[in-house]
Amino acid sequence: MPNYDFDLLVIGAGSGGVRAARTAAGRGVKVAIIEDRYWGGTCVNVGCVPKKLYSYASHFAEDFKDAAGYGWTVSEPEFDWATLRDNQRNEILRLNGVYNRLLEGSGVQRIEGRGVVISAHEVQVGEQIYSAERLLIATGSWPYIPDFPGSELCLSSNEVFNLPEFPKRFLVYGGGYIATEFASIFKGLGAETTQVYRGDKILRGFDEEVRGFVQEEMQQHGVNFFLGREILRIDKHLNALAVTLSDGRTLEVDAVLCATGRRGNVENLGLENVGIKPNSLGEISIDANFCTQVPSIYALGDVTGGPQLTPVALAEAMTLVHNLYSEEENRVMDYSNIATAVFCHPNIGTVGVSEEEARKVYKNIRVYTTCFKPMRNTLSGNPSRCLMKLVVDAASDKVVGCHVVGPDAGELVQGIGIAVKAGLTKADFDATIGIHPTSAEELVTLRSVTRT
Ligand code: NDP
């Protein structure tokens, strides 16, 4: 066997790459990992982690208001962007250190720089060439910004966390996860917030009822929606941006966040040197064992075009390492029933199929819904409501979808995700005694069918 520098050479130290490197090293595999930007990748540096911190920050706006009905006198709260931004930065720096120590502690060699694949077993970083029996591409994804005049004036999610000034008038372009979360966050932090989306209802792909409900709730929280419109151009006017929409209207704002999807991060990766051709979305094609068309080169995570979610990349990494370096039988990654949350206000937690998908897949379904004012919102006078929904396959009685919109919906649906993954029935839900008084108990007390 040729004498390689490493058994496994990972390109990209994000969620998937780091997990693969660490777990492989833990099995005695000689591993190195190459990173040119952020140790910890998008999730830790410009994604899930700082986003959740900002989501917490923006929820305080509502909490201060709610406190009055519970007898608290709160003086007019003031928000300081610099404090939030800098505290967030320090926390991310701390996490970068944790990632580095975890890698070093597990015996993974860290290499800083852009890795360029030059052959089926070699990667060049600067002047240095490293060889390995296997290469793993885990370079993640990168924000995609459509091309229109002035699009270079847009922020992407890479920049939005560390803005020097807080934008008093904030415009978000897109209707997906990032756009909807950031519209909620900046509204909560006090910006006059507008969301522009080309479709007629945000969050395409989610349950229709959930989409409509969230949009209404966000509107009630003060987010302005311009739907069925695209951005035609953006012009810089002194300190403001003039955003012209496809209906001819011009909006003046301080910042525009373009959240129009993320594409595989494959630029200057040298894939052409080994004949790997990503598709137009920058996605690398792999087989069920994460192998590309080159037998020694593997890929996983966002760059392969699967669900762009950290827990998916982590699970893929562990499946790959198990299959490559364990004597046990190969595992197959199961992509069914992945629970997910959107941290907009109110939060969405969802697992399984939407009502619309269920109608296509199952012959007969039963849908149970409830929409109510959470107890916490009684004394406060907060008008926000909560939506809960179960979708049941009538033939098997299995709960095949659960959708929750309301406070901490992600926390709640993580637990329900186990029940749905385990294939539990509506009768199992009914036999479960609720925890009182909680909002979550509604999910085990839904008795009347709303629709079939
Ligand atoms: P999404 O795919 O969720 O949404 C992209 C949005 O941009 C859609 O509304 C889409 O419209 C719109 N769009 C795409 N192309 C254009 C265009 N050319 N012109 C105008 N609008 C366009 O991507 P995001 O960027 O929001 O997030 C990327 C991924 O990151 C998500 O899919 C998700 O997997 C992950 N993520 C997960 C989070 C979580 O778990 N909480 C949080 C944030 C991100 P249309 O619907 O019409 O196609």
Image (spheres, rainbow, N blue to C red):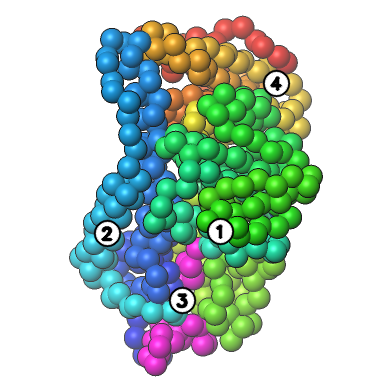
* Residue type, mark 1 in image: Leu
Mark 1 near ligand 1 (CB under 8 Å)?
no
Give the answer, above or below, for where 221 lies relative to 256.
above
For the point 43% across and 73% down, which residue is it? 11
* Spatial separation of the CA atoms under disc 4 and disc 3: 46 Å
Q: Which mark is residue 135?
A: 3
* Residue type, mark 2 in image: Leu
* Spatial separation of the CA atoms under disc 3 and disc 2: 28 Å
Disc nearer the start of the sequence (4/1): 1
Badge 3: few (under 14), some or many (20 or more) residues near its Cα, within 10 Å?
Answer: many
> Residue 259: percent from the left, percent from the top?
58, 52
Q: Which residue is mark 4?
A: 365
What range is drawn magenta here?
116-140
Q: Are marks 4 and 1 in contact (CB under 8 Å)?
A: no
Q: Secondary structure at mark 2?
A: helix
Q: Which mark is residue 401?
A: none
Give the answer, above or below, for where 75 lies relative to 1.
above
